[in-house]
Amino acid sequence: MSKQQMIDLIRQRNRSATSDFLVKFDEDALRTYLRRLTTVQGHRGRSSVWVRDGVSPASVTRACA
């Protein structure tokens, strides 16, 4: 799937995401976000799971200045 096709699919699912914003991301990031959007719009319940890809941390903290 091309980068433009992924952007079009993302915009169908998230109308607040602009093309100008999405074009700044690489294809892997867009693919991950599209997969996440597709999962969220799917079924929910006990059998619904999200598997973190390992690229982003499970938790994030901020150090005080």
Image: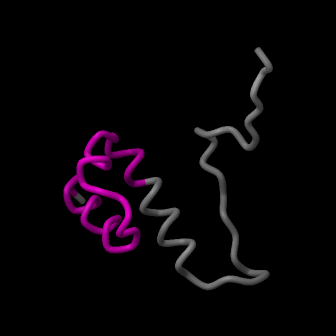
Question: Considering depth in this image, is 61 or 65 the residue closer to the camera?
Answer: 65
Residue at position x 67%, y 83% in the image? 44
Tell how many labels.
Answer: 0
Closer-to-camera residue (33/64): 64
Residue 5, horizontal then vertical, whole percent: 22, 62
Q: Residue 28's image quarter? A: top left
Q: Which residue is at a point 35% across and 65% down the rendered structure image?
A: 10
Residue for point 24% across, 54% down = 19
Specify whether 46 is left or right of 23. right
Location of residue 11 in the rendering, given as x and y in whole percent from the top left corner: 31, 66
Question: In the image, is residue 32 above or below residue 62?
Answer: below
Q: Nearer the viewer, residue 62 or 53?
A: 62
Residue 62 placement (x, y as % from top left): 75, 27
Left or right: where 8 falls relative to 59? left
Please provide percent x and percent y for residue 55.
58, 38
The stretch of residues the image draws in magenta is 2-31
For the C terminus, the image quarter is top right
Q: Is residue 30 magenta?
A: yes
Q: Is residue 31 above or below residue 35?
A: above
